[in-house]
Image (cartoon, grey):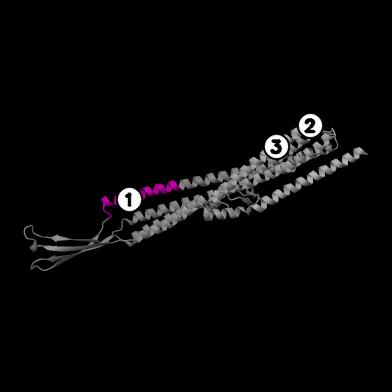
Amino acid sequence: MKKNKNKAKGKRQKANLKYALLFNFYFLLFTFSSSAQVITLDSVLNIIEKNNPMLKMYDEQIRSAKDYSEMAKSWMPPKFSTGPWQTPYNDFKSGMWMFTGEQMFPNSAKQNANYKLMTGMSILETKEKSVRVNELFSAAKQNFYEWIILKKKNEILIQTDSLLSYMIGVAEVRYTYNKEKLSNIYKAQADLYELQNMELMLNGDMSMKNVELNTLMNIDKNTVLNFDTNIVVKNYELQPPDTALISATRSDVKLFDEKINLIKLQQKFEQSKRLPDFGISVSHMQTFGDMPNLYSAMAMVTLPIVPWASKEYSSAIKGLNCKSNAVNYERQSLINLTAGNLASLQAQIKSTKNQIANFENNIVPAYYKSYQSSLSAYEENTENLFIVLDGLRMYRMSKINELNQLNTLLKLQVSYEKELEIR
């Protein structure tokens, strides 16, 4: 009868300890969740696009290039000169005083060619900004997903922490009835302290990822954010690499297209240098004596087609042809490399998904059943606490390894999205 009472008392103590641990766990979880702002990945990307100083720098460069393009429509300043003209050294009054004004009129075709060239530079800056946006988004996604994985690992440790605390409480009760070894209790306590150490490490890593994301968003580095932990796994391995899609989506490929277009505009500007410019020169000669006042009106034209002047733009046009070919080959190389990277990433994604499925369907359930069976045997006094601790540790490690594989999959997913600039 006394034995049954002790057994019932032990069960009540275990139940009370279990409920107390669960209450503390959910209370802490609720407190943490309510004290931190929840933010989604899309919100992070929007804030980066709006606040990141590097992107603001590109905005200023784009505006600068547009402002510079207006100078293409300017004219050369007029020239004004004055001084004595045909004046004898020994009789100043017998000479004249001349006023001369000159103005060159730019060729409108030249101006238009130069304007288009300088406008193309602003478009180039826009494409370079898109390349930088893709890089920043990729870094943000990587840090965001790593924070989620760290949080999920921490939740596993907290769960294991609660189970270990529960088991230690049960073991201590059993020890009072000489049904447990003191060495096993110490071993369980050591495992609990190691878990707490790991929790501290994970919390530190989460804070680091938080700071990195805050830096990308250009907000206060000490702002604590609780990011949305929903993970969407994409089926990118089912999409065959398409060079047309690469050309249509990648900003750096479009950047090469704009570079080629800019070279063509530069060639047209160089070709426009063959065209002449016109000008006028008007002079007035004011006499000091009895001679009548005189004037002179001259028209001017440049002759850029002469051999000694045409070498400049002719050589530039030929050099730009070679430069255009080089950029085109670089563009083709990038598309080829991207297609290879996408095929490689798809193979890795497929393999990683198979490993995750094996963890989820086989490895983790098997370790959980092993732990449950050893725990049931321990409760029936047919198993040692050390075996239960080992089973719990192996189950925890299998869950951590599953998250490591998920982290690998998310890295591959981010790399794939970076290759095709998928937001």
**Which residue does the image show at 37% across and 47% down from the upper left?**
319
Q: Assess disc 3: are there few (<14), some (14-19) or many (≥20) residues with their C-alpha within 10 Å of its C-alpha.
A: few
Q: Is residue 72 above or below residue 192?
A: below
Q: Is residue 157 above or below residue 229?
A: above
The label number, if any, that marks residue 314 in the structure image: 1
Picture coordinates of residue 324, whole percent (x, y): 42, 49
Label 3, secondary structure: give it.
helix
Picture coordinates of residue 1, whole percent (x, y): 93, 39
**Which residue does the image show at 67% across and 53% down from the upper left?**
34
Spot the residue most to the left: 90
Label 2, secondary structure: give it.
helix
Dominant secondary structure (helix, strand or loop) of the stretch shown in magenta: helix
Of badges 3 and 1, nearer the viewer stands 3
Q: Label 3 amino acid?
A: Tyr
155 falls in the magenta region = no
Q: Label 2 amino acid?
A: Leu
Which residue is disc 2 drawn over?
Answer: 182
- State the separation of the CA atoms marked 3 and 1: 78 Å
- State the separation of the CA atoms marked 2 and 1: 93 Å
Label 1, secondary structure: give it.
helix
Q: Which numbered disc flags the more N-terminal residue, 2 or 1? A: 2
Label 3 close to label 1 by CB (< 8 Å): no
Instruction: Out of 93 and 243, give the one closest to the viewer.
Output: 93
- State the separation of the CA atoms marked 2 and 3: 17 Å
Of badges 2 and 1, nearer the viewer stands 2
Q: How many badges with numbers are in the image?
A: 3
Which image quarter: residue 286?
bottom left
Q: Label 1 amino acid?
A: Ser
Which residue is disc 3 drawn over?
Answer: 193
Tell me if 172 is positioned left or right of 149 in this view.
right
Spot the residue most to the right: 1
Q: Which residues are the magenta region?
A: 304-327
